[in-house]
Amino acid sequence: MAAPHPDELALKLTRALTDLDLDALVATLQAGGNLTRPPAQTRANLKPILEQARTDHINLLRPPADFHAWLRTPLLSNARGGVASNNTIIARTSTLRGLYTTLRRAGLISTDPLTDFQTPPAEHARDALPHRDDLTRLLLNATEPTLHAALTLMYRHALQVTEVLSLRWGMYDHARGRLLRRRTVSTLDPLSIQALEPLLASAGGPMHAHDDAHVFPYRTQDDLRLAIFRVCQGANLPFIGPSQIRRASLRDFPLAQTDAGYADPRSFELAQTLARSLGTRDPDGESHD
């Protein structure tokens, strides 16, 4: 297929962006040889941006003054309502940069709207763990009691996300400061007990908190990731994901491996005893990671 004449390309691009027609836009870019990624990937990367632009009545050819701030919403969101990964954000931004490069070459814009727009660092499987000072700052800035308690348990005792989501008050022995977990029973340190106190008080206190009531309101991993992401933004920290917090716990606290159920030979016996005393299911009926 022959490439369209420059004037025809400019006209088609203008029409596609004015109508926020994703299919027409990708087809026009492909016909002009202006795709740096496969069409399906280009479409996936641009889709949330065009959809948000339609919702907010944003002209992508003439972006508003707060374009960079606005852009973070479609770049950061994913289809499940959570936070997109750093690599997804980078890919979306790169595809949008390619579009604006094409628009400049076609004479439709004179300056790049993405100048000085910052993207997060790429995520790699072997990324270094967050520094202990950054985790301390994260906890200090997580002033909302629920998130502060969740982060404290994750960092001090290597709780998994699934444990945070499934934790119920019946699994917490307040008198002994012990927590029934999937593989073991953890004796909580004073900071973790302190972090749980306001949540327990809101639930009615040790004598009245319902055993089946969830300790934390998060229903999905994305709910928790989004809450952590917002704190990281406010604290000017790179996003620190739950798995990074857990691995940092195993690095920073010698007892974290025992807490996670990996090293204590008495773990199963303790778990059975606490399960019986609290009227909860024995841990041998639980699935393991």
Image (cartoon, rainbow, N blue to C red):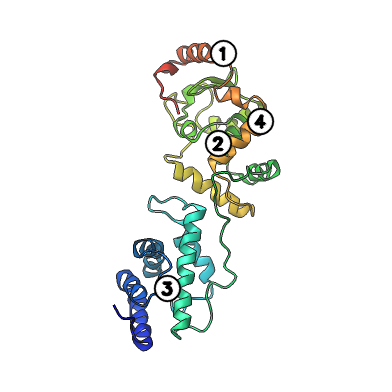
Query: Which of the numbered marks, if any, corresponds to residue 150?
Result: 2
The amino acid sitting under disc 3 is: Ile
Q: CA distance from mark 3 to mark 2?
A: 38 Å
Q: Please, which residue is most extreme toward the right here?
A: 133
Residue at the extreme front of the image, as rendered: 1
Q: Earlier in the sequence, mark 1 or mark 3?
A: 3
> In this rendering, would 9 be left or right of 227?
left
User: Which residue is the site of mark 4?
Assistant: 191
Tag 2 and tag 1, C-beta contact below 8 Å: no
Q: What residue sits right under mark 1 in the picture? A: 265
Give the percent coordinates (x, y) of residue 200: 54, 29
Residue depth check, mark 1 versus mark 3: number of the one nearer the observer: 1
Q: Are marks 3 and 2 in contact (CB under 8 Å)?
A: no
Residue 208, visible in the rendered structure = no
At 42% from the left edge and 26% from the top edge, which residue is drawn? 212
**Horizontal side of residue 134 vs 28, given as left or right:** right
Q: Which residue is mark 3?
A: 58
**Whole-percent x and y of residue 153?**
58, 32
Question: Considering depth in this image, is 241 or 128 the residue closer to the camera?
Answer: 128
For the residues labelled 1 and 3, the Cα–Cα distance comes to: 60 Å
Q: Amino acid at mark 2?
A: Ala
Mark 2 / mark 4, whichever is N-terminal: 2
Which quarter of the image is occupied by the N terminus?
Answer: bottom left
